[in-house]
């Protein structure tokens, strides 16, 4: 991602984060911490209202900072996960410019000026893409990270109109 010049990476997603956004943020934080030894922050945009999503956060011990309480620091890179800017799916103000957007949704956002963009609209889950990044870097996964990624993929492609793509399938098999 080219995050070497930054002191810390902050991950943001859409309002009322679901397992795909939560798992993606956790997986990317694991990638950044493992490869760059940089600290990360995971955020929460609004309440986590669904009981199964709250259970995921509690069981996997997510440490989420509410977006509305963030104090931005110089040297932070902001990475939007499972969402895109100016789509109405998040309440993040643009006090800090986005460094990267990683997503799978069809909703086109305003990506102009974002240095790193990986939006794969044919994927069933953003967690699949994050799993692929971890596989390519041969990063060992903890049970916690693997569980979050797998649950994110499973909830995103099961019982929804989205079909699983080959990358979704290979990510699930790996996990």
Image (cartoon, grey):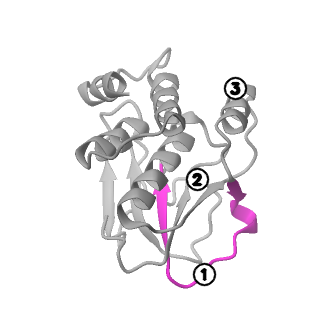
Q: Label 1 belongs to which residue?
A: 73
The mark nearer the N terminus, 3 or 1, is 3
Residue shown at the point (67%, 53%) measured from the top left: 45
Name the image quarter holding the N terminus: bottom left
Residue shown at the point (48%, 55%) measured from the top left: 29
Query: Which quarter of the picture shows residue 40?
Result: bottom right
Is 159 above or below relative to 29? above
- Numbered tag placed on residue 88 in the rendering: 2
Q: Is residue 17 left or right of residue 120?
A: right
Question: Which span is picked out in magenta?
Answer: 64-81
Q: Which residue, as the protein is rendered here, is positioned at the far top?
A: 159
The mark nearer the N terminus, 2 or 3, is 3
Categorize mark 2 by other alpha carbons within 10 Å: few (<14), some (14-19), many (20+).
few
Q: Is residue 9 left or right of residue 88?
A: left
Q: Is residue 71 magenta?
A: yes
Query: Which quarter of the picture shows residue 107?
Result: top left
């Amino acid at each position: 991602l080219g995050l070497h010049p930054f002191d810390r990476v902050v991950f943001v997603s859409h309002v009322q984060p679901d397992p795909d956004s939560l798992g993606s943020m956790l997986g990317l934080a694991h990638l950044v911490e493992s490869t760059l030894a940089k600290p990360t922050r995971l955020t929460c945009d609004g309440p986590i209202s669904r009981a199964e999503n709250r259970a995921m956060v509690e069981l996997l011990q997510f440490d989420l900072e509410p977006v509305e309480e963030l104090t931005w620091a110089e040297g932070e890179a902001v990475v939007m996960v499972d969402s895109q800017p100016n789509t109405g799916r998040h309440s993040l103000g643009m006090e800090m410019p986005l460094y990267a957007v990683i997503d799978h949704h069809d909703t086109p956002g305003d990506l102009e000026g974002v240095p790193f963009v990986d939006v794969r609209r044919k994927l069933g889950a953003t967690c699949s893409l994050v799993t692929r990044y971890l596989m390519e870097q041969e990063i060992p996964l903890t049970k916690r990270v693997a569980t979050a990624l797998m649950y994110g993929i499973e909830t995103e492609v099961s019982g929804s109109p989205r079909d699983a793509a080959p990358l979704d399938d290979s990510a699930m098999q790996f996990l």
